[in-house]
Amino acid sequence: MNDIILQKENHLATITINRTKALNALNTQVLFQLEEVLQDLKKDDNVFVVIVTGAGEKAFVAGADITEMKEFSVFEGRNFSALGNRIFREIENLEKPVIAAINGFALGGGCEFALACDIRIASSKAKFGQPEVGLGITPGFGGTQRLARIVGIGAAKELLYTGKMIDAAEAYRIGLVNKVVEPDKLMETAKTLANGIAENAPIAVKLCKAAVNRGMQMDIDTAVMYEADIFSQCFSTQDQKEGMTAFIERRHKNFINK
Ligand code: CAA
């Protein structure tokens, strides 16, 4: 799996897209490798939080692989889009928070990859954009859908129609990223955030993710009922007993993900 590096350290897993010769562009092979890694993480109860990043100094992911797409038929284009969309939905639905540590270019499929994550931290050198229209195509890995949901319709349409690149400061201003840090602080910041999340009850964190993601698709009455359902589920966990007992006994909590 040399295009994807998976590292696990305590409750944290880091996925690095490692195809630096093509600025970590996503081709079919990389996407299948990413899917395999996600299957591993899905099953690993010891991993509470995931970070994704790109290898090298220059790029997070510079998009879907243009060399591969150039001669696509309509059928191949559809399959490639379906594959990317399936995998990014797996990230969005993974029952653990996923943090994108965006170290450089996040263009096209790279921006879409970051959009499928829960939280985005950018290096001050990162650049964002959906340049697809300049290649004669639309985004195909969810960009036309998630960008508008995250930054709003106006800002999304401007990025989609112009294909222009924006810097990290502008990405922060429009709400595309949660935070911008100096390049040498990127992984440290992402890991501090991840470890802070990992100190909390993993089932409660997982249910927060589901509540936000699913609730956003519902009307508010259904959504708050859904929240009541998941809130009540927490009372069947050992971690709820531990969290509340530790608070009352004024001692350190020891969550076990059960
Ligand atoms: N696909 C394939 N190869 C890519 C690539 C991509 N998306 N992006 C960069 N590369 C390759 C380049 O072809 C080049 O390879 P060679 O050395 O073999 O020529 C290598 O990576 C380095 O790139 P550059 O020489 O272009 O580096 P640069 O510093 O001059 O420019 C860049 C950097 C601005 C990111 C430029 O590479 C670029 O514009 N890349 C394409 C970005 C893009 O359009 N992404 C969207 C793709 S479409 C998409 O993603 C569709 C979808 O939603 C599914």
Image (cartoon, rainbow, N blue to C red):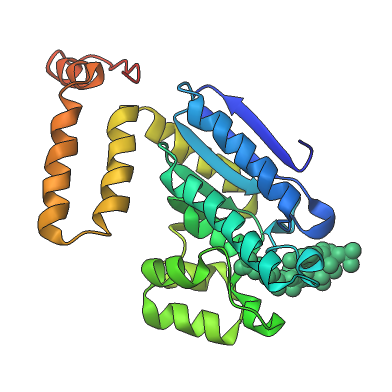
Quadrant location of the C terminus in the rendered image: top left
Q: Nearer the viewer, residue 211 or 158?
A: 211
Query: Can you tell which quarter of the image residue 126 is in?
Result: bottom right
Q: Is residue 242 left or right of residue 108?
A: left
Residue placed furthest toward the right: 21
Q: Is residue 236 above or below residue 62?
A: above
Expressed as whole percent of the image width and height from the top left, the position of residue 207 reads: 28, 38
Expressed as whole percent of the image width and height from the top left, the position of residue 104 reads: 67, 60
Q: Is residue 159 above or below residue 14?
A: below
Expressed as whole percent of the image width and height from the top left, the position of residue 129 reads: 59, 73
Query: Can you tell which quarter of the image residue 245 is in?
Result: top left
**Residue at x-position 44% and y-position 40%:** 94
Report the label total. Answer: 0
Q: Is residue 81 left or right of residue 150?
A: right
**Residue at x-position 13% and y-position 32%:** 232
Q: Quadrant of ligand 1?
A: bottom right
Expressed as whole percent of the image width and height from the top left, the position of residue 110 reads: 62, 61
Whether residue 107 is visible to the viewer of this picture, yes or no, is no
Quadrant location of the N terminus in the rendered image: top right
Whether residue 132 is visible to the viewer of this picture, yes or no, is yes
Q: Is residue 238 above or below residue 93?
A: above
**Residue at x-position 34% and y-position 16%:** 256
Q: Nearer the viewer, residue 161 or 229?
A: 229
Q: Nearer the viewer, residue 194 or 45?
A: 45
Query: Can you tell which quarter of the image residue 174 is in?
Result: bottom left
**Residue at x-position 21% and y-position 59%:** 218
